[in-house]
Image (cartoon, rainbow, N blue to C red):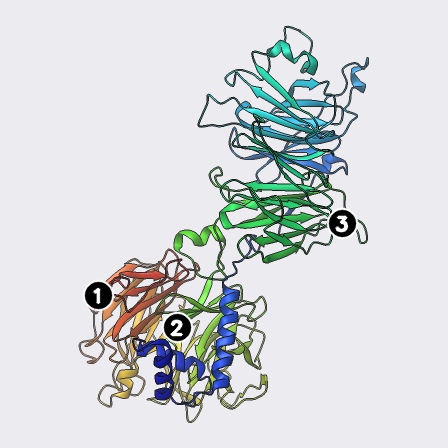
Amino acid sequence: MKFEEFQEVLRSVIGPDIEDMWVERFFNEVDISCSGQIKWQQLCSYLLLEYTERQRASIPIAALLDTPPQITHCLDNKREPTVRLVAVSFPPPLRYVSVSKGGQITVWNSSLHILKTFRLAGDPAEEVASTRRFRGWTTDAVYMENFHRVAVATDCRDLHFLNVSSTNVLEDLHLFGFSSIPTALCYWHDAQRREEPPLLLLGDEKGGVHLMWFLNRSKDLFKNSSSKDKGPQRIFLPDLGEHSSDVSYRHFPDVHQNPINRIMFQSNVIMTSSESDATSVVFMNVSMEQKPYIWKVEQGAKCFDYSASLQLMVTGGGDRTVRLWTRYVTSSPVATLPGHGATVLDVAIYQAVGQIFSYSRDAELKVWDISTHHCLKSLRLHFPCLQPGRIPEHGNFPLLLLCPPLPEETQPHLVVACKDYLAVLGLSETRRGSGGWLTDGEKAQMGVKSLSCALYNPTLREVAAGHADSSVSLWDVATGRRRLHIFNAHGEVEITCMTLDSSHRRLITGARNGTVKVWSLLNGLNLHQLEPVSDSEVSGLACLRGSKVLAVGWSQRIAQYDVTHAKDLKVKADMSWKSRGVHRSDMSAVRSCSALGVVATASYDGEIVIWRLDAQGPLVHLRRDTVEQEAQPVDSLLFLQHRAENKQLRTRGVLVSSQAGWLSFWSVTGENHSYGQFYAPERSGQRVRCLSSDPPGNTLLVSGSTSGWVQIWDISCYALDIREACGRPPVLQSWKAHDGPLACVEVLDVSEKLFVFTASVDGSAGLWTKNGIRVGVFGQQVMWSLSDPTTNGR
């Protein structure tokens, strides 16, 4: 059916109030062959692909940043696994304390460099002091922040309290004589309510829970001993009654049938887990006035985590499955997430981004989305201690998640312990969309890959951008909604330039390794791969009439490709252009002007060459007169198409070039070529990276600088008379659009209104009115509507 018939069908289905602009764009998207007609099969294929893309786009990116983990070897562990790693924030800066299975204590700085080492004290009953080394195994450790101590539990049925208030580590307290081995620790205190005493919780090997409230938080943990013996103060647990003014002790026996492996405390609720089928996880009130909540999991729970604000509990265990549970429903999980190949050792809820980390015995880390239950990422951590066919030894608590609030200059991260190695993985601080652009405030936190090029598609009314991580983003200008995201367009190689074919239905991208590819803007499929001239960077692409593509770059030659009727994936390069040896430096830009039948290329030595399309040879050489000793590269070229189509104006300044911040106007067919120049940026030492002009009149010139500023110039009368081409044209508007250098500025004519699209190398992109009022940032949560005056800044 043709457009008119298609429009009537849509109105009969959707309603008569449907916008003509939306129908036209919809029709153009479906009519990928540009025949002016669409078939039902095309429409069905489009709707299926659109639904699939929207579903995929709704899945966020894993919070793990795409940076290799920092792996550190704990040499002082002597090949024993790290049982627990805790973060110590006082005194600043951030430090870590690791506890090995054999009792080795190591203090690290935030970069995992060793500051101090210490070993737990041995049995003081031994007669020879030199033989008093610790002979047991540690089971857990916890940081008691307001007392500046780390409590370490061991299988000797005791607790060692280490003072970490300075860079030195000192064991000053030793609590011994527990009836069973403490296997899990938790510490809680309310910094806002100082009347609430801090609480230390212990879970033991017999399934019991021990509680110790410290009543004098302004003093020490226990009453000071009058003994003058050297070494830590030793307190026998049955004698704890002598410290009743400082400590309140309570014991709940037989909470579980198996040893407790995790213990937490929130809102007067004690949360514990074990590998018991009958009492896998237990939530009980500290007052025991309410009946406890008991979750039963086959093979029990090896680990769990709980978020009070989400009312969500996550468990993992020997059945290699992660389960999600609600707070008050114990009968069945909300979701069951299989996928691990070994026992799940630890889980952690990253509430800020709505994701879950799970880690298994085979050193595999998985990231799950809470809302969709999708596995966003699986990462096999390549610890040097891993050996084929062998399961590495782990401590009981391999994960440490550090999330906001954090000390200054500290980013969220995850630390994973495997045997005597530690791996640090960077995390994003907020939820990441599926490859979208972010606001200036978010981009640094989330590690957004820099943006290298962008353009506007007037037919489909969308913008496209190429990123350093070799991905391409497509966004709807009218709403800011992401339409398509292409991952790994050129493998892992940065995309350097892009252009549209003559139908505006296909996107051509060039990369730093010399490859050029053609993509369908309907479904993101790679239609063609163009034969590279060399393995050097492609810096510019231009499309001629008939969808012939020109590629220039560091090869210093012009390659032509005919993709009009190409059916094969591979398209050979046509090297018929007489370009060998013309440019003596690498090419930096290319632009075509069909009205004049010419192509302009520029190079890094400041030379501009005008080529005839019919002869495929050089016509004119242009170079700006400079006082600099070293030639500056030409950053951008722009043909003023309206002037080129006007017979009276085509001999005037029709080509604009940008070089070291200077904008030069050139005539390419008249007797005189230079029609004036001016320095555009407000400050010296800056450059203009991108140029654009308003369609179709070319009365405005928009420039974008390396300082992130946009300037709009009135060039309606500029460079038309060689005798008057001096000074700067009037500046109509000027504003700072981004923090980083601009990679693209384009003037958009949407529904007879002018807008300015900007994109920065810092990874952000935005839409503005011609008066400099921001419409929105692509990737923001709230979409806009250009047809609504309240949302477009007018």
* First along the sequence among labels 3 and 2: 3
Residue in view at x 51 percent, y 69 percent: 53
Q: Is residue 718 left or right of residue 590?
A: left
Secondary structure beneath label 3 = loop
Q: How far apart are the two marked residues, 3 and 2, measured between alpha carbons? A: 48 Å
Label 3 or label 1, whichever lies nearer to me, is 3
Q: Are marks 3 and 2 in contact (CB under 8 Å)?
A: no
Q: How far apart are the two marked residues, 3 and 1, measured between alpha carbons? A: 64 Å
Q: Is residue 427 left or right of residue 684?
A: right
Q: Quadrant of residue 751?
A: bottom left
Residue closest to the far bottom: 614
Q: Quadrant of residue 572?
A: bottom right
- Give x and y (percent) for residue 234: 69, 14
- Which disc number belongs to residue 462? 2
Secondary structure beneath label 1 = strand
> Label 3: how many residues lie within 10 Å, few (<14), some (14-19) or many (20+)?
some
Q: Amino acid at mark 2?
A: Glu
As rendered, which of 499 and 276 lies closer to the eye?
276
Q: Is residue 361 left or right of residue 694?
A: right
- Which disc number belongs to residue 130? none
Q: Which residue is mark 1?
A: 731
As rendered, which of 141 and 713 lies closer to the eye?
141
Q: Amino acid at mark 3?
A: Leu
Q: Which residue is mark 3?
A: 386
The quadrant of the image that shows the C terminus is bottom left
* First along the sequence among labels 3 and 1: 3
The quadrant of the image that shows the N terminus is bottom left
Q: Relative to 55, does residue 655 appear above or below in the rendering?
A: below
